[in-house]
């Protein structure tokens, strides 16, 4: 019963809150969508913290998503010891980068009185949860070996079962506590996505790669 | 030919007395908010000097503007891929230290201190975190310190200038300085617009005003670096960038922008220029010494029937064309070629033009007392107190000739009027000066009129906006009256 609550109901609830909440916020309060950068107030630790964090966490996220979406390919990539070592090594390097980055960002918010002025409770919640999430991830990576392979046998079918509306929590229900905590914390992060600064992820400006440089806009006419 | 209209500006530096009234008018209206205290959409700098933010002209440090790479203009800050790669930490972002940390004073201490032997003091405290601070700089920290070897000596324009020029700039007995009021240049090839990853910054087609859409801005901060004039500012509280809006709500109701309206020296002119938008790319591809001339070529004659026909075809209303024909900016920039763009070598095609200051130039080389300038009118420019070289680096991308030409005209106008009203210059001398400057007596008279005696309507020729036709009357104005300001129905909170 608890498994159904934690690994079926909670994920659906979280995704519903994330999608609904983000859309609602976007259409009612677009002004609040920003990176909320504080680089202007403190630049030195920000460089190391933010750069390491983002360059660590984005590849990590992408690898996780690839595990959900193209498990066959990922399985193939882990089929020889050499590629498996390489995959595990890459995962750990990115994970450590993210962990160090999050730590630096955390330290910065504590140490700088200027940064504290632009820190909201939501910022603290998100930072702590993210740090905890990466910490758990690293614990799994080092404590429960070859996650790259068992991930595909457990987490992938669980997520797939949720996505196809045939929930099967049994895939993850018998895993040890630490991986379960990792999943729950991830679900929690999804649930709080619309309520803080995380929404800046949906603002990633890919269109800058091709948009025209100069924008000229007529009032109540289309862009020329 | 794609014709657009641009509300453009001329600042006549000869008339600026450095009173900062413009800055205060602007601040009171737009930037007296938390998060924006350090912003000066309008500021006045002492030149030579380091400016605001410190040494903003040094693009090796700030990476603003464009540069030519293989003949193509490219942002100095980034290419498209670099822009996305640097989102998380912009390597060229000026920090608050490059501007200044806004402060106030702990006035309460004056009243609440316990009785003691010493007078209580109001200590300066930061307006960011409320902590006591040592005030180390401010928005016009080097005000009136033109000759100082702490501030003026760090002026980026002095790099590579000859020792002789530097000696003239810093000789104690003959110190000179002049003022540079600066607002957003509302450029045609704006660096901020091109650098914004979100595409939040745009130019209004009707009047060319460059604005930041506060709803689309995501706080990536690239505009702050890419503007070579450092006229976009990052609001540290809301996490959005802001800039001069040329008081468009005032313009749309037929009033001059606040800084223009309040200008004590009446140095500011505002009017429409018609230009050919198809030429923008070509105009920024030419070599440095051609830039000003090329920009002038883009600006079209509003009396030319062909231009008028093309303008109508491009959707420019008749009223705007009429305004362009009466534009004082057109006279200064195109007809008389007296006004020059600030740092054209940044290749953003700025549409704010400066008439170089004549006054410090004219009190040339005299060892004592005054000297009749006309004896030695044109050669004196070679040994002018403000080296022409300094002006040309600032206003003509190093093309001395353009500055000298403007000065020759200004001197000729002065002699012409002096012959007429004071009489210590003979009319022959005046005629000779006019001939040398290549101008007619009528032109001299017109320059004199618009420089010395213009009234409000002559200085500010604001085009009709016709907003009443653009805006649907779906909102009850009485209902909107008590709300938070132009276009926004929510107060601008940080984040959620």
Image: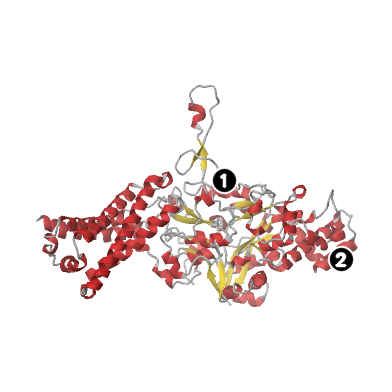
Is residue B145 shown above or below B156?
Answer: above
| Label 1 CA crowd tier, 10 Å (few <14, some 14–19, many 20+) | some
Q: Earlier in the sequence, mark 2 or mark 1?
A: 1
Question: Which chain is mark 2 on?
Answer: B
Camera-side residue of B294 and B488: B294
State the residue position of label 1.
B137
- Determine whether, in the image, residue B467 is placed left or right of residue B476: right
Residue B353, given in percent of the width and then of the height, sits at: 65, 62
Evaluate whether residue B200 shows in this view. yes
Residue A137, given in percent of the width and then of the height, sits at: 24, 59
- Determine whether, in the image, residue A138 is placed left or right of residue B143: left
Is residue A149 shown above or below B30?
Answer: below
Q: Residue sitting at 59 percent across and 68 percent down?
A: B347
Camera-side residue of A166 and B466: A166
Front: mark 2 or 1: 1
Asked which secondary structure carries label 2, the reply is helix
Q: In terms of image quadrants, where is residue B438?
A: bottom right
Evaluate whether residue B453 shows in this view. no
State the residue position of label 2.
B432
């Amino acid at each position: 019963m608890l498994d159904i609550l934690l690994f079926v109901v909670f994920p659906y609830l979280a995704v519903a809150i994330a999608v609904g909440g983000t859309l609602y916020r976007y259409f009612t309060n677009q002004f609040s969508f920003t990176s909320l950068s504080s680089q202007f107030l403190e630049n030195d630790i920000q460089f190391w913290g933010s750069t390491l964090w983002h360059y660590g966490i984005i590849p990590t996220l992408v690898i996780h998503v690839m595990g959900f979406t193209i498990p066959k390919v990922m399985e193939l990539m882990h089929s020889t010891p050499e590629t498996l070592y390489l995959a595990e090594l890459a995962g750990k390097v990115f994970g450590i980068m993210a962990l160090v980055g999050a730590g630096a960002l955390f330290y910065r918010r504590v140490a700088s009185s200027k940064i504290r002025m632009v820190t909201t409770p939501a910022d603290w919640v998100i930072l702590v949860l993210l740090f905890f999430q990466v910490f758990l991830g690293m614990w799994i990576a080092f404590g429960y070996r070859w996650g790259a392979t068992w991930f595909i046998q457990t987490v992938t079918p669980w997520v797939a079962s949720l996505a196809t509306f045939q929930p099967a929590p049994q895939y993850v229900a018998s895993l040890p506590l630490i991986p379960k905590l990792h999943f729950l914390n991830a679900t929690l992060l999804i649930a709080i996505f619309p309520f803080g600064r995380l929404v800046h992820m949906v603002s990633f400006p890919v269109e800058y790669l091709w948009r025209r440089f100069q924008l000229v806009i007529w009032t109540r006419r289309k862009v020329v | 030919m794609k014709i657009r209209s641009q509300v453009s500006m001329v600042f006549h530096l000869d008339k600026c007395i450095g009173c900062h009234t413009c800055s205060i008018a602007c601040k009171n209206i737009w930037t007296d908010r938390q998060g924006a205290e350090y912003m000066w959409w309008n500021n006045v700098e002492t030149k030579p000097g380091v400016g605001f933010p410190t040494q903003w002209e040094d693009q090796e440090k700030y990476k603003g503007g464009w540069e030519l790479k293989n003949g193509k203009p490219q942002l100095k800050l980034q290419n498209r891929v670099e822009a996305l790669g640097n989102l998380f930490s912009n390597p060229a972002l000026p920090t608050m230290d490059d501007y200044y940390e806004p402060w106030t004073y702990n006035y309460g201490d004056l009243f609440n201190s316990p009785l003691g032997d010493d007078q209580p003091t109001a200590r300066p405290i930061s307006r960011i975190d409320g902590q006591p601070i040592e005030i180390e700089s401010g928005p016009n920290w080097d005000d009136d310190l033109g000759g100082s070897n702490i501030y003026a000596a760090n002026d980026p324009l002095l790099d590579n200038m000859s020792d002789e020029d530097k000696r003239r700039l810093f000789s104690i007995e003959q110190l000179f300085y002049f003022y540079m009021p600066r607002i957003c240049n509302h450029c045609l090839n704006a660096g901020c617009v091109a650098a914004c990853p979100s595409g939040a910054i745009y130019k209004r087609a009707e009047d060319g005003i460059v604005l930041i859409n506060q709803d689309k801005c995501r706080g990536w901060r690239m505009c702050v670096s890419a503007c070579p004039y450092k006229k976009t500012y990052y609001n540290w509280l809301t996490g959005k960038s802001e800039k001069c809006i040329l008081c468009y709500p005032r313009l749309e109701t037929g009033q001059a922008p606040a800084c223009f309206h309040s200008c004590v020296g009446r140095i500011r002119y505002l009017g429409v220029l018609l230009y050919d938008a198809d030429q923008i790319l070509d105009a920024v591809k030419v070599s440095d010494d051609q830039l000003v001339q090329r920009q002038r070529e883009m600006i079209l004659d509003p009396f030319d029937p062909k231009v008028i026909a093309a303008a109508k075809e491009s959707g420019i209303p008749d009223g705007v064309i009429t305004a362009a024909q009466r534009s004082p900016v057109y006279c200064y920039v195109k007809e008389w070629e007296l006004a020059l763009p600030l740092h054209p070598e940044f290749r953003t095609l700025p549409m704010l033009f400066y008439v170089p200051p004549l006054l410090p130039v004219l009190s040339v080389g005299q060892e004592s007392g005054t000297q009749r300038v006309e004896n030695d009118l044109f050669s004196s420019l070679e040994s002018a107190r403000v080296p022409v070289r300094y002006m040309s680096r600032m206003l003509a991308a190093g093309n001395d000739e353009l500055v000298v030409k403007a000065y020759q005209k200004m001197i000729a106008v002065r002699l012409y009027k002096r012959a007429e009203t004071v009489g210590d210059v003979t009319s022959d001398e005046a005629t000779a000066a006019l001939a040398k400057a290549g101008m007619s007596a009528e032109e001299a008279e017109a320059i004199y009129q618009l420089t010395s005696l213009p009234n409000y309507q002559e200085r500010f020729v604001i085009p009709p906006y016709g907003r009443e036709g653009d805006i649907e009357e779906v909102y009850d104005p009485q209902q909107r009256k008590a709300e938070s300001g132009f276009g926004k129905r929510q107060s601008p909170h940080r984040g959620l």
